[in-house]
Image: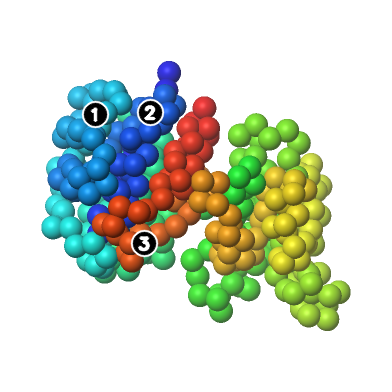
Amino acid sequence: MRPRVAMTMGDANGIGPEILVKVLADEELWAGCDPLLIGDVAVFEQIAGVVGIELRFRAITEVAQARFTPGVAHVLVPSDLSVPDVRWGVMDPAMGEAVAVCMRAALRLGTDGEVDGFVGAPLNKLAFHEAGYDYLDELAYFSEVTGSTEAFFMGVIGDVLTTAIAEHVPFSAIQGRVTKQNILWTTRNMWRVLNQVGVADPTVAVAALNPHAGEGGLLGTDEIETIIPAIEAAQAEGINVVGPVPADVIFPQALRGDFDGIVGMYHDQVNTGRKLQPPATSATLYMGLPVVGATTAHGTAFDIAGKGCADPASLGAAVRWVCSLVS
């Protein structure tokens, strides 16, 4: 049986609906999963006309009404969804509210067992915030909705998984998050997920925080005082982990096959290297929730919204990873 995957509309003023329509036009997607859109039918019809894709959309109010046949996409329309007229490239808090409504619906379906996983088209964090959702990121919102206390992001580049100790925090707050406890917890989770997706005897690399891994304390003592003790604690638990690896070489080494997973210290340290890779190889995973989720490795791309040129490759990768994790 194919996994049933909910796909939320994202910010309709961005490229989310466009890339959803494009991945749904690929029959290989339908061979791998049963896709269920969550959003507004008129939005999808509008962008399908722009990109010239012949895809029919049918509104439903419950999952039992859905049929999964290529060429016909069923759209679950939440009863509390209100979508204003699309204004491509414009930040609109009303669209941020629509994103929240669609994501709540997807999470509810996941926790109730009506879908096996979800994929969210990109949202605009400012629109989300100005809609009244005072969270640093969408994962914090998902955690509150589902009552999850240990949710975390993972990034994908090809077969390599990445995660960071400090995600969406000011740069000044990073060092306070780099603790032995946080590094050990994150390394354990990386090891667990790598085993979950079938990597045999995975190797996890932990990045250094300071240049040249601190140069023996000359450029900082975080490696000596915090990172190395965390690595040694993980090794004592039987985890195959190495480091601290200087951040300027950890990605080249991982991409040549030395490591299966990277535990970075902060957001940009892992995401800069990840976003230099082709979009088809990259996605962002939501882990530690009651249901597996993913999104693109990019944002709403307001600058090209409505132009029909958005690349759906990262969204396609997100769908494949959700299906893999569900399996």
- Mark 1, residue position: 72
User: Which residue sits at x=68%, y=35%?
Assistant: 199
Q: Give the farthest residue toward the front.
A: 52
**Residue on which the image places disc 2:** 27
Image spot of residue 136 (x, y percent): 41, 65
Question: Picture coordinates of residue 272 (x, y %)?
Answer: 58, 64
- One can see residue 181 in this view: no
* Residue type, numbered disc 1: Val
State whether residue 21 appears in this view: yes
The reply to whether dot 2 and dot 3 touch (C-beta < 8 Å) is no
| Residue at 81% over, 47% down | 236
SS at mark 2 in the image: helix
Residue at horizontal 86 percent and vertical 74 percent from the top: 216
As shown in the figure, which amino acid type bears the numbered disc 3?
Answer: Ala
Identify the residue at image location x=20%, y=45%.
49
**In this picture, is 58 found above or below 308?**
above
* Foreground of the two, 142 or 286: 286
Q: Horizontal and vertical percent for residue 129?
A: 31, 67
Amino acid residing under circle 2: Glu
Please tell me the numbered disc located at residue 301: 3
Q: Residues within 10 Å of mark 1 (few under 14, many from 20)?
A: some
Q: Nearer the viewer, residue 19 or 291?
A: 19
**Mark nearer the N terminus (2 vs 1):** 2
Q: Residues within 10 Å of mark 3 (few under 14, many from 20)?
A: some
When the figure is inspected, residue 254 is found, relative to residue 62, above or below; the finding is: below
Disc nearer the start of the sequence (2/3): 2
Question: Measured along the vertical axis of the image, is residue 160 above or below residue 227?
Answer: above
Q: CA distance from mark 3 to mark 1?
A: 27 Å
Within the image, what quadrant is residue 44 found in?
top left
Question: Is 196 or 232 nearer to us in this picture?
Answer: 196
Q: Is residue 230 above or below residue 312?
A: below
